[in-house]
């Protein structure tokens, strides 16, 4: 039982850090990758909570469709970064 709590805590901390990095990073492509990492961590939390259907749907809909669409739009915009 303690092992599951530690794994859940690791995924929770990783999801909070990646969500903060989604907002804090200046590169839009990296921001989308952090968003995908956040969705994968939240899906893992759903698996650990025993809601497998919601976790799989979350992966398919958000990671498989919405995040990839964001990534394609950001890559097509060709935003120039100021150095």
Image (cartoon, rainbow, N blue to C red):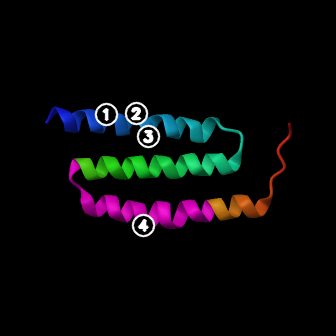
Instruction: Give yes or no for contact between labels 3 and 1 (Cβ–Cβ under 8 Å).
Output: no
Residue at 60 percent across and 65 percent down: it is 69
Q: SS for tag 3?
A: helix
Instruction: Give yes or no for contact between labels 4 and 2 (Cβ–Cβ under 8 Å).
Output: no
Answer few, some or many: residues within 10 Å of disc 4's Cα (few below 14, many 20 plus, some between 14 and 19): few
The spot of residue 24 in percent (x, y) is 63, 35
The residue to which callout 1 is attached is 9
Asked if the magenta segment contains residue 57, the reply would be yes
In primary-sequence order, the first of circles 4 and 2 is 2
The residue to which callout 2 is attached is 13
Residue found at the far left of this picture: 1
Look at the image and give the residue range highlighted in magenta: 49-70
Answer few, some or many: residues within 10 Å of disc 3's Cα (few below 14, many 20 plus, some between 14 and 19): many
Q: CA distance from mark 4 to mark 1?
A: 24 Å
Answer few, some or many: residues within 10 Å of disc 2's Cα (few below 14, many 20 plus, some between 14 and 19): few
Please give left or right for residue 13 compared with residue 35 in the image: left
Residue at 30 percent across and 60 percent down: it is 54
Instruction: Give yes or no for contact between labels 3 and 2 (Cβ–Cβ under 8 Å).
Output: yes
In primary-sequence order, the first of circles 3 and 4 is 3
């Amino acid at each position: 039982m303690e092992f599951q709590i530690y794994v859940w805590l690791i995924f929770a901390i990783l999801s909070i850090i990646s969500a903060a990095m989604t907002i804090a990073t200046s590169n839009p492509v990296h921001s989308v990758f952090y968003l995908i990492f956040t969705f994968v961590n939240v899906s893992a939390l759903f698996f650990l909570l025993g809601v497998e259907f919601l976790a799989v749907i979350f992966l398919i809909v958000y990671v498989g469709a919405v995040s990839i669409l964001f990534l394609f739009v950001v890559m097509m915009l060709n935003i120039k970064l100021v150095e």
